[in-house]
Image (cartoon, grey):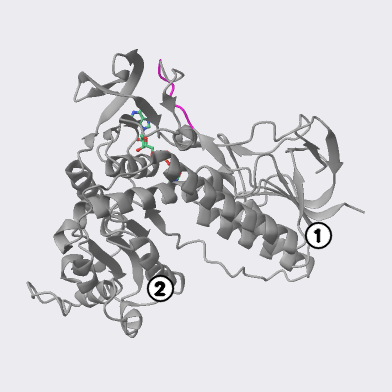
């Protein structure tokens, strides 16, 4: 008799969601966590970052936008320590909520560091050095990822921070050089530029947010530059040195050595899967580089029968909501197998995963861009709406943004959408729903969207697929 039906190792958004779902599906479940439940997302990632973005955005809005509508806040200032406290309290409240949910659903929380053995035993080493052994029918690994450091001289100097280190700052930095213009790099640049720090981004690839729609990266570069952020693309960092200004980053741009200096350097050059101490010597598990290889058709089972892995520790999209979706898919399949239902198709569609960036304005994307479709030889028609003609955007003085939609030329099935505008990260879900359910432009146009809302821009972009956007002066008529 095993102690549990399922042991989950790691209580981030992949692990804790899987554990709660498993308990709801009737499995006797335990979850092992070394630090705090919530993982990177709640403690060192999404939630604290969005709290900082909210605070910094509010400050900027009061200072810069207030005057235009008759609100004067000449004395506007901030207390950085209080912003940090607010960020921490927000995380703490959510972590407390997750703990209560785990307890309330009957999931046993086991604090400590879990190590998997070949016979699926899991040993857990507590903070006080004591060790306990647990057994389970199945084990789910959801140990996530940690910041990756670039291998250059000076990366270990004091003042060189990862995203974890930035959240621990208790005083407002005067200046930052951010290595990497990916999602973490541009979100931190948005926070600290809005609070008035001097920010420089050094990105090796030809553009920031290289994986997103080209027009989005170009627009964001312009917008960040307007906020006084220096951006160097095609610029490979090769050294960091201590200097009078704090730290100096050396990088090569167009064949020439250049430098950028700041009080701190933030290394935002990606993350790596976290498997330190996870496997005992008697475990042989197939890996794909540093990531654990899994078979999606078997609900993310690894090469060891009965051992599964999800989230940032496996290959594929590394986002909190992807990890949660994989966790649900995984345990739904386990429950179906237990019930002898071999033809079960889990409820979640893992092929329509939105990507969101919390810049100012927000960015969101799902499915294919027009360029992706072209590359894959898929004939498409597209629609675009410029949000400066949207009433709500005008009221709130939002940056000029846009909504784009990509659909199959013959059937009108929606293949992708890209947005750069206020509330883009909320609104993208309309397109996610459409793609996950194979809906067409015509079907999505049947919905009447309320006025005045940003969502009206979705209707307009869809109408533009036929050249019929109502609030656009016609430049052309599409077939
Ligand atoms: P990333 O891979 O998105 O970006 C890292 C960037 O660093 C790349 O563009 C890369 O070219 C650049 N880089 C690497 N080495 C360099 C060098 N020597 N010199 C200059 N540039 C260099 O990684 P990230 O921004 O660190 O984010 C990590 C993960 O966390 C990603 O998977 C991301 O999607 C996720 N994340 C998501 C959100 C969100 O959903 N809003 C927020 C934060 C992080």
Instruction: Label 1: state its secondary structure.
Output: loop
5 to the left or right of 63: right
* Quarter of the rendering containing residue 153: top left
Instruction: Label 2: state its secondary structure.
Output: helix
| Residue closest to the far right | 1
Cβ atoms at labels 1 and 2 below 8 Å apart: no
Q: Where is residue 328 in the image (x, y as percent from the top left)?
A: 62, 62
Mark 2 neighbour density, 10 Å: few (under 14) some (14–19) many (20 or more): some
Residue at x-position 18% and y-position 59%: 400
Residue 231 seen from this side: yes
Residue at x-position 62% and y-position 48%: 294
- Label 2 CB-ligand 1 distance < 8 A: no
* Quarter of the rendering containing residue 172: top left
Tell us which disc is closer to us: 1 or 2.
1
Magenta residues (range): 148-153
Q: Position of residue 250 (x, y in %)?
A: 29, 19
Q: Badge 1 is on which residue? A: 28
Residues 39 and 466: in front is 39
**151 is within the stretch colored magenta:** yes
Q: Badge 2 is on which residue? A: 434
Residues 326 and 143: in front is 143
Q: How far apart are marks 1 and 2 (CA)?
A: 36 Å
């Amino acid at each position: 008799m095993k102690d549990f039906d399922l042991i989950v190792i790691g209580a981030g958004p992949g692990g804790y969601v899987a554990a709660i779902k498993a308990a709801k599906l009737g499995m006797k479940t335990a979850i092992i966590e070394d630090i705090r439940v919530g993982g990177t997302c709640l403690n060192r990632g999404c939630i604290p970052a969005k709290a900082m973005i909210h605070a910094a955005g509010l400050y900027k809005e009061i200072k810069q936008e207030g005057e235009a509508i008759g609100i004067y806040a000449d004395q506007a200032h901030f207390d950085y320590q209080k912003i940090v406290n607010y960020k921490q309290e927000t995380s703490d409240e959510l972590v407390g909520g997750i703990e209560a949910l785990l307890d309330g659903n009957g999931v046993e929380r086991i604090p400590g560091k879990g190590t998997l053995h070949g016979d699926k035993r899991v040993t857990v080493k507590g903070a006080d050095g004591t060790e306990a052994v647990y057994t389970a029918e199945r084990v789910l690994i959801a140990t996530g990822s940690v910041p990756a450091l670039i291998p250059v001289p000076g990366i270990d100097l004091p003042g060189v921070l990862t995203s974890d280190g930035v959240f621990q700052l208790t005083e407002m930095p005067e200046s930052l050089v951010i290595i990497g213009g990916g999602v973490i790099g541009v979100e931190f640049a948005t926070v600290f530029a809005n609070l008035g720090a001097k920010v420089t981004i050094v990105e090796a690839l030809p553009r920031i947010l290289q994986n997103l729609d080209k027009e989005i990266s170009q627009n964001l570069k312009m917008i960040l530059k307007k906020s006084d952020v220096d951006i160097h693309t095609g610029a490979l960092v090769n050294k960091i040195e201590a200097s009078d200004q704090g730290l100096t980053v050396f990088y090569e741009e167009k064949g020439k050595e250049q430098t950028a200096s700041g009080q701190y350097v933030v290394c935002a050059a990606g993350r790596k899967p976290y498997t330190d101490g996870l496997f005992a010597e008697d475990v042989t598990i197939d890996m794909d580089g540093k990531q654990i290889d899994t078979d999606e058709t078997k609900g993310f089972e690894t090469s060891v029968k009965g051992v599964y892995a999800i989230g940032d520790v496996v290959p594929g999209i590394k986002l909190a909501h992807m990890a949660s979706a994989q966790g649900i898919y995984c345990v739904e399949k386990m429950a179906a197998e237990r019930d002898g239902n071999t033809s079960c198709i889990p409820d979640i569609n893992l092929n329509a995963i939105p990507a969101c960036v919390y810049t100012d304005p927000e960015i969101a994307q799902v499915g294919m861009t027009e360029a992706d479709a072209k590359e894959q030889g898929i004939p498409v028609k597209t629609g675009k709406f410029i949000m400066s003609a949207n009433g709500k955007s005008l009221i709130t003085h939002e940056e000029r943004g846009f909504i784009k939609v990509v659909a199959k030329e013959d059937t009108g099935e929606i293949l992708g959408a890209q947005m750069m505008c206020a509330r883009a990260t909320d609104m993208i879900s309309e397109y996610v729903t459409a793609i996950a359910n194979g809906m067409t432009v015509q079907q999505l146009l049947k919905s009447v969207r309320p006025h005045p809302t940003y969502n009206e821009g979705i209707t307009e972009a869809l109408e533009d697929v036929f050249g019929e956007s109502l609030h656009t002066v016609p430049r052309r008529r599409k077939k």
